[in-house]
Image (cartoon, helix red, strand yellow):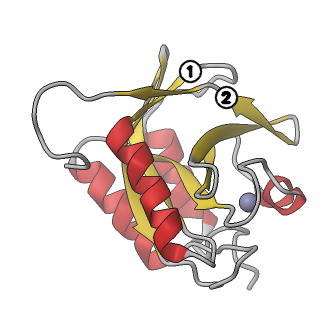
Amino acid sequence: MRPSPRSALPRTPRSRVRRSRGASLTVGDVVHIRRAVRDGILEHARRALPDECCGLLIGLATGTGTQITRAHPARNLRQSRTRYLIDPADHFAAIRTARRVGLAVIGAYHSHPASPPLPSATDTREADDTGLLYVIASPALSEVRAYRLDGGRLRSVELRTTVSRGIGRPGS
Ligand SMILES: [Zn+2]
């Protein structure tokens, strides 16, 4: 059995999640990410050094844009400095967490420990879902970028950091 490229998760549950929201993601839309979530991804990337980290992105995609509200860290089954494979158990946990709060898994993230947050040839080759966001974090540059698969290429989309209003702990 050949696992799905970036997660050993079978394709079916992912496809079901993707369709369940009924919102189509359009290339070129703006993606909003809470600052605490962005910082959390970078923090995860630093903790995982020298290896790549990976995880799932939970949020909401609407006609007017995409909102990443939570990052769900996952184990990197490859334990590699240049590759990642999301543990399917963590992927399922993210799906359950998202459903509980009426959201969906809308993408995945991983880090580039020693290179800029630009899609590698492997990232492009293994990206297989036009409905998902692919986020890459560079702990060295403190930079996070987002991409979508479009015409066989990972194209950059604008990632806008938002500060959550009110009090509340970051990441809560
Ligand atoms: Zn990569």
The residue sitting at 63% across, 57% down in the picture is 140
Residue, disc 2? 157
Q: What element carries label 2?
A: strand
The furthest residue to the front: 140
Q: Earlier in the sequence, mark 1 or mark 2?
A: 1
Q: Hey, what amino acid is under mark 2? A: Val
Give the class, few, some or many, for how many residues have Cα within 10 Å of label 2's Cα (few <14, many ≥20).
Answer: some
Q: Is residue 1 left or right of residue 9?
A: right
Contact, mark 1 vs mark 2 (Cβ under 8 Å)? yes
Identify the residue at horizontal 64%, vertical 23% (top origin). Answer: 26
Give residue 110's position: percent from left, percent from top.
60, 60
Write down the quadrant of residue 147 in the picture.
top right
State the residue position of label 1: 30
Residue extending furthest left?
Answer: 167
The answer to whether residue 132 is visible is no
Question: Could you say which is closer to the camera, residue 170 or residue 60?
Answer: 170
Q: In which quarter of the image is the N terminus?
A: bottom right
Q: Distance between the residues labelled 1 and 2?
A: 7 Å
